[in-house]
Amino acid sequence: MGVEVVVDGLSKSFGPQTIWRDVSLNLPPGEISVLLGPSGTGKSVFLKSLVGLLKPDEGQVIINGTDICTCSESDLYEVRKLFGVLFQDGALFGSMNLYDNIAFPLREHTRKSESEIRNVVLEKMEMVGLIGAEDKLPGEISGGMKKRAGLARALVLDPEILLFDEPDSGLDPVRTAVQNQLIVDLNAQIDATFLIVTHDINTARTVPDNIGMLYRRNLVMFGPREVLLTSDEPVVVQFLNGRPDGPIGMSEEKDSALVEAELAKHGRPKVPHMMPQLEVSPGLPDRSAVHRRKDRVLRQLRSLNPSAQEEILKSLTPEELALYGFQSPATGSWPQQQAQPQQTQPQQAQPQQRQAPPPQSFPQQQPQAQQPQAQQPQPPQQQRPSPHPRQQEEPVWPGGLQAEQETESAGGRRRWFGRKRGEQ
Ligand SMILES: Nc1ncnc2c1ncn2[C@@H]1O[C@H](COP(=O)(O)OP(=O)(O)OP(=O)(O)O)[C@@H](O)[C@H]1O
């Protein structure tokens, strides 16, 4: 399972320019999270801060008990072994074929033999659908293939945290949909913690378990997908509707009188309807994160807004409603919570039975006849075997990081990932 990333009170400025301040969020282990925000709100700066490429001014980023903002270089090096990063254009070496590009981190940072490297490279190329393209040069393939090659390279060192910087940039809607499915399928296979920075509304609506949004130097919200996707915050609604009228303008912030005038003219945009989250392709294992998330979100259900609560409960099967102590009313669509959790006998064997969390009180709670409290059956935890067992002793960060870090700290906005002069 991927590791949790705990961000606490993070602030970052460049000289007098505050990028964001006091950002706090937890990326739950193994779940897929998306970070949205208008251009220039500092999403890429946030990703770079998570891997220690940029040093925040204040706050902590705790990964496996280490605060990467204050730890030593050697500790930072260890923590970075947990990360894989997919850069916007794949950041491939233009003079190397795809096979060598993907093999590069293994050759640089491990002592694997060429036959071992071959096994890993072909395994990852197969995962991203690139088998047969080993000999192609980056200049000979489409943008989508470049991204998938970059993804295969990010996977070869078995990351526990995978960061995606605008994986859908430059892709047509069909390629974006294919790539979104690939991301969900990969998450099922490797169960790593994913964070995706994107502008693509469909990606935000269908891929993640959790969504956050940066705006006006603050994290507007971060939490279960249902919270942001049902939010009526004007900035969220404008962003999800992709409308020009609203608080977000060309320079990010609009005059409030202008916003009001626009809204009076065009009407307030509606909260778009929820779209179902993408499911894993047939034949692949379930996403373990879905089950963990269900437990987690239902524990915090009551603290969420009513629309989010309703969407979460609507997504549960009758068996799950019963397991977690809710029951559907005879009529209507709003599930009512039972006073006590009942021992349940799901009609069909579930692939992963969970122990229900303690019952939540619920806004429309109906008093039920007191049920004898039953011990929930404790199912054997299915430990998903990782297809990519980590080799602890091996350093695992692709080349170029150190050079890039120096470039960043020298000031000025440069490429995130260093490449040789003349490389694509
Ligand atoms: N190394 C740097 N030195 C100085 N300013 C920087 C540096 N890196 C980023 N910035 C500034 O930080 C701000 C946020 O940039 P960032 O690239 O993180 O935004 P973003 O939200 O990812 O934008 P987009 O969605 O357009 O990619 C910008 O004003 C940018 O110029």
Image: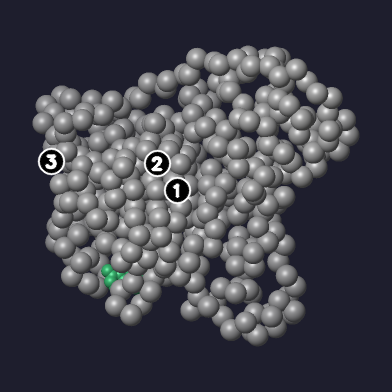
Question: Which residue lies under the disc numbered 1?
Answer: 26
In the rendered image, residue 378, in percent from the top left (x then y), is placed at: 56, 16
In the rendered image, residue 419, in percent from the top left (x then y), is placed at: 18, 57
Q: Which image quarter: residue 326?
A: top right
Distance of label 3 from label 1 (alpha carbons): 32 Å
Amino acid type of the residue that numbered disc 3 sits on in the rendered structure: Glu
Which callout, 3 or 1, points at the residue further toward the start of the chain?
1
Question: Which residue lies under the disc numbered 2?
Answer: 4
Indicate the quadrant containing the C terminus: top left, top right, bottom left or bottom right: bottom left
Query: What is the crowding at mark 1: few (fewer than 14 residues within 10 Å), some, or many (at least 20)?
Result: some
Amino acid type of the residue that numbered disc 2 sits on in the rendered structure: Glu
Ligand 1 shown in quarter: bottom left
Q: Are marks 2 and 3 in contact (CB under 8 Å)?
A: no
Which callout, 1 or 2, points at the residue further toward the start of the chain?
2
Residue pictured at 44% horizontal, 56% vertical? 24
Residue pictured at 45% horizontal, 70% vertical? 217
Distance of label 2 from label 3 (alpha carbons): 27 Å
Q: In this view, does 145 lie above or below 248?
A: above
Instruction: Provide the secondary structure element on which disc 1 rests.
Output: strand
Amino acid type of the residue that numbered disc 1 sits on in the rendered structure: Asn
Question: Which residue lies under the disc numbered 3?
Answer: 108
Instruction: Provide the secondary structure element on which disc 2 rests.
Output: loop
Query: What is the crowding at mark 2: few (fewer than 14 residues within 10 Å), some, or many (at least 20)?
Result: many
Q: Nearer the viewer, mark 3 or mark 1?
A: 1
Which callout, 2 or 3, points at the residue further toward the start of the chain?
2
Distance of label 1 from label 2 (alpha carbons): 7 Å
In the rendered image, residue 335, in percent from the top left (x then y), is placed at: 78, 36
Indicate the quadrant containing the N terminus: top left, top right, bottom left or bottom right: top left
Residue pictured at 35% horizontal, 25% vertical? 386
Looking at mark 1, is its residue's CB closer than 8 Å to ligand 1?
Answer: no
Q: Are marks 3 and 1 in contact (CB under 8 Å)?
A: no
